[in-house]
Image (cartoon, grey):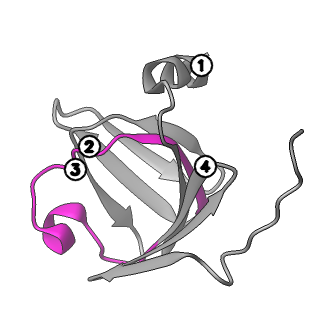
Amino acid sequence: MAELIKKSFESPEKIEEYPGLKSELVNIGGIEVYRMTFKPGWSWVESIGSQSCDSEHIIWVVLSGRFAVRMNDGTTQEFKSGDIATIPPGHTSWVIGEESVVALDIEKEGIDKTLLASLLED
């Protein structure tokens, strides 16, 4: 039987900080939920130091602020509060404007990422 589980970002299981970025992880029911906070001026290239992110972001939910993602093929999309996306590997990103961006990056180990991405496109 499934159980009701409650967790909070008030007590994350893991916190990582990088220049202009704070990542907080909560595991709940086999799902990893990261609360990502990006400061104004943050960009992948300048803060992380590589030209492209090789991670796949299965479900990306923007809670506040504005954020841009550019795929390696040049396709660019802007995201704002309330937007939900799936972002494949091979992209760069940056904060737009003077407001911090807060987003949830939701992952599940072993999930069929191709199937989930196709469901999100419908």
Sequence-wise, the earlier of marks 4 and 3 is: 4
- Taking 98 as reference, is 27 left or right? right
Sequence-wise, the earlier of marks 4 and 2 is: 4
| Distance Cα–Cα, label 4 vs label 1 | 18 Å
Nearest the eye: 49 or 40: 49
- Residue occupied by mark 2: 70
Sequence-wise, the earlier of marks 4 and 1 is: 4
Callout in the foreground (1, 2):
1
Three-letter amino acid code at disc 4?
A: Ile
Three-letter amino acid code at disc 3?
A: Cys
Q: Quadrant of the C terminus?
A: top right
Three-letter amino acid code at disc 2?
A: Arg
Q: Residues within 10 Å of mark 3 (few under 14, many from 20)?
A: some
Q: Which residues are magenta?
A: 37-63
Residue 110 circle label: none
Three-letter amino acid code at disc 1?
A: Leu
- Residue occupied by mark 4: 31
Q: Give the answer, above or below, for where 70 lies relative to 42.
A: above
Q: Residues within 10 Å of mark 2 (few under 14, many from 20)?
A: some
Is residue 99 among the parts visible in the rendering? no
| Distance Cα–Cα, label 3 vs label 2 | 10 Å
- Answer with the quarter of the image where residue 7 lies: bottom right
| Distance Cα–Cα, label 1 vs label 2 | 22 Å
- Residue occupied by mark 3: 53
Nearest the eye: 29 or 42: 29
Q: Give the answer, above or below, for where 61 lies relative to 116.
A: below
Residue at 36 percent of width and 52 percent of height? 68
Q: Residues within 10 Å of mark 4 (few under 14, many from 20)?
A: few
Q: x and y percent of residue 74 in the render?
A: 18, 34
Residue at 10 percent of width and 53 percent of height? 51
Check residue 59 for magenta coloring. yes
